[in-house]
Amino acid sequence: MRYDDLLDLVDRALTEDVGSGDVTTEATVPRDALAVATITQKAPGVISGLDAAEAVFRRLEPDATIERGPEGVWREAGAVVLRVQGRARALLTAERTALNFLQRLSGVATVTASVVRAVQKAGGGATILDTRKTTPGMRGLEKAAVVDGGGTNHRTGLFDAILIKENHAALGGGIEAAVRAARAARPDLPVEVEVRDAAEIDSALAAGADRLLLDNMTPDQVRAAVAQVGGRAALEASGGISPETVVVYATINGLDFVSLGWLTHSAPALDLSLALERSP
């Protein structure tokens, strides 16, 4: 995510939370009080989103002193994530917005890391991909969190790769016609085709698709598809795959990718806490 876009997102998040002012903090905390805020992990996992959290604090306290822990590294409960020193009022007002970014993004990174670790432990060779099932306005940050967790980004949006799905094929005259039209319109982009059965696999291969997305197939159906394709196209399994079932798919020989919308649409937040101590 571009820094200007990040600041715009942070400003909107702060406006949503602070509104016309933090009435509790303004009523109870002296204007000149200084403090140190320390964010720590209450659960094991991978941190992501430090740029967003730092931007929140600096929006309210531009002169804050900030010490950051690492991103993209699995750490145990009790690890220090971020330490911020500055005006106590600003730190208190920033607390929830900064934690919302950090907990959401670290949750995505943590579940991704858990999936990648499980696949590696099982000896699976498939690459773990994310999807476009992201929070509106948060895609850049959530996809960065997937990478922090050891996963790989699929296409960023509708603009950087061609993925012909069921509805595209239906409206475009069938799979082969849709692939030909896509090749003619954007010869510079790779073409992936969603397929649901052996007949659609044959159509996609005949059209010269670069990759096939095996949609909502069982592990046995994926194995059959691998045999049918015989290395003529890259293969991605997608649809209904969860952290509980991903290893079964990722260990199928000949399957190149497994994509999980779960990584971004269902990842639980990582439990973090912020403690504030008054400075002299």
Image (cartoon, grey):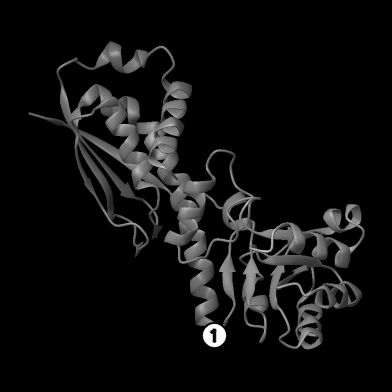
Q: Residues within 10 Å of mark 1 (few under 14, many from 20)?
A: few
- Give coordinates of residue 28: x percent, y percent: 26, 14
Q: Is 44 situated left or right of 146 in this image?
A: left
Quarter of the image that includes the N terminus: top left
Instruction: Pick the quarter of the image with the C terminus.
Output: top left
Task: Between residue 76 and residue 94, name the one nearer to us.
Answer: 94
Residue 269 in view: no
How many discs appear? 1
Q: Nearer the viewer, residue 4 or 196?
A: 4
Look at 66% across and 78% down and name the residue there: 248
| Residue 180 falls left or right of residue 42 | right
Q: Say which quarter of the image contains residue 246.
A: bottom right
Q: Is residue 44 above or below residue 85?
A: below
Q: x%, y% of residue 163?
A: 72, 60
Q: Nearer the viewer, residue 5 or 258?
A: 5
Which sits in the foreground, 83 or 2?
A: 2
The residue sitting at 90% across, 56% down in the picture is: 170
Rendered location of residue 227, percent (x, y): 78, 88
**Residue kind at label 1, given as amino acid type:** Gly
Mark 1 secondary-structure assignment:
loop
**Could one spot residue 18 in this view of the protein?**
yes
Say whether residue 139 is left or right of residue 35.
Answer: right
Q: Quadrant of residue 279?
A: top left
Q: Position of residue 213 (x, y in %)?
A: 74, 68
Q: Quadrant of residue 196?
A: bottom right
- Left or right of 128, for residue 233: right
Query: Which residue, given by chain and number where applicable, does mark 1 sit on?
Result: 123
Q: Is residue 146 above or below residue 54?
A: below
